[in-house]
């Protein structure tokens, strides 16, 4: 038997990482948005094309900027180059986000990654008071590395949620039918 995996679009992404001062809990939704916004403005892209991943072991921050193609990716790398000369330069770029960069782990490079489009209902709500509104993209994206098993977790969570809604709906209808029979 041949099993065929579903087709998942692959896109071009400019990716880089750095270590910031503080703890992971310091990076609430507003601070994450401010980071995304700073990189979007510097790179000349929509803020919805910037994905921030924050992990522990100090504060490791990975930034993925979704771009149309390799040529655009190379332009974004050039636009960001002056901010990646050292930690102080990157801290200056992120001053409005109140982020102090301790070290740059990787500089911006163009790569390809698997992208999963999620409906807007599954995305987190926007932060309460973002900086001036940039233009919005028609459909948000979440970037998932090809070697990552995150897609299974996302799909499992969505499937589990839908299953729970189905079960609750069935139980509600069953209870309502029983109540209707008692009235007759």
Image (cartoon, rainbow, N blue to C red):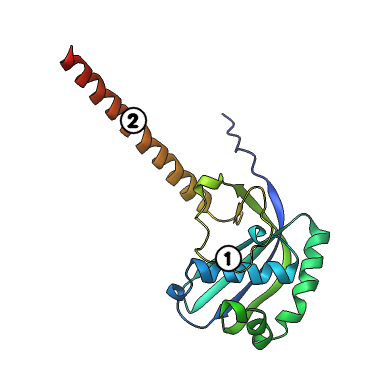
Q: Residues within 10 Å of mark 2 (few under 14, many from 20)?
A: few
* Residue that protrudes farthest toward the top in the picture: 184
Q: Is residue 145 left or right of residue 107?
A: left
The secondary structure type at the circle numbered 2 is helix
Q: Give the percent coordinates (x, y) of residue 154.
A: 48, 49
Camera-nearest residue between 43 and 112:
43
Q: Give the percent coordinates (x, y) of residue 143.
A: 61, 56
Q: Give the percent coordinates (x, y) of residue 72.
A: 80, 61
Q: Quadrant of the N terminus?
A: top right
Q: Quadrant of the C terminus?
A: top left
Above or below, comparing residue 16 to residue 163 in the picture: below
Above or below, comparing residue 20 to residue 170 in the picture: below
Which of the marked residues, 1 or 2, is nearer the chain's N terminus?
A: 1
Residue at the image point whose x is 23% and y is 25% from the top: 175
Locate residue 19: give its quadrant: bottom right
Above or below, comparing residue 73 to residue 108 in the picture: above
> What distance separates the C-alpha of mark 1 from that of mark 2?
36 Å
From the image, tell me which residue sits under label 2.
169
From the image, tell me which residue sits under label 1.
52
Residue at the image point whose x is 25% and y is 23% from the top: 176
Q: Nearer the viewer, mark 1 or mark 2?
A: 2
Above or below, comparing residue 71 to residue 81 in the picture: above
The secondary structure type at the circle numbered 1 is strand
**Label 2 near label 1: C-beta < 8 Å?**
no
């Amino acid at each position: 038997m041949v099993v065929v995996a579903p087709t998942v679009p692959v896109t071009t992404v400019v990716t880089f990482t750095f270590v910031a001062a503080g703890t992971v809990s310091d990076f609430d939704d507003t601070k994450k948005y401010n980071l995304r916004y700073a990189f979007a403005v510097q790179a000349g892209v929509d803020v919805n094309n910037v994905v921030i991943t924050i992990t522990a072991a100090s504060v490791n921050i990975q930034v993925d900027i979704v771009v149309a193609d390799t040529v655009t990716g190379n332009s974004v790398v050039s636009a960001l180059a002056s901010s990646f000369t050292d930690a102080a330069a990157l801290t200056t770029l992120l001053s409005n986000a109140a982020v102090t960069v301790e070290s740059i782990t990787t500089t911006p490079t163009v790569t390809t990654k698997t992208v999963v489009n999620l409906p807007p209902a599954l995305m987190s709500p926007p932060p309460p008071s973002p900086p001036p509104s940039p233009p919005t993209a028609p459909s948000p994206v979440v970037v998932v590395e090809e070697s990552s098993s995150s897609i299974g977790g996302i799909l499992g969570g969505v499937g589990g949620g839908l299953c729970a809604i189905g079960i609750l709906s069935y139980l509600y209808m069953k209870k309502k039918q029983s109540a209707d029979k008692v009235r007759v």
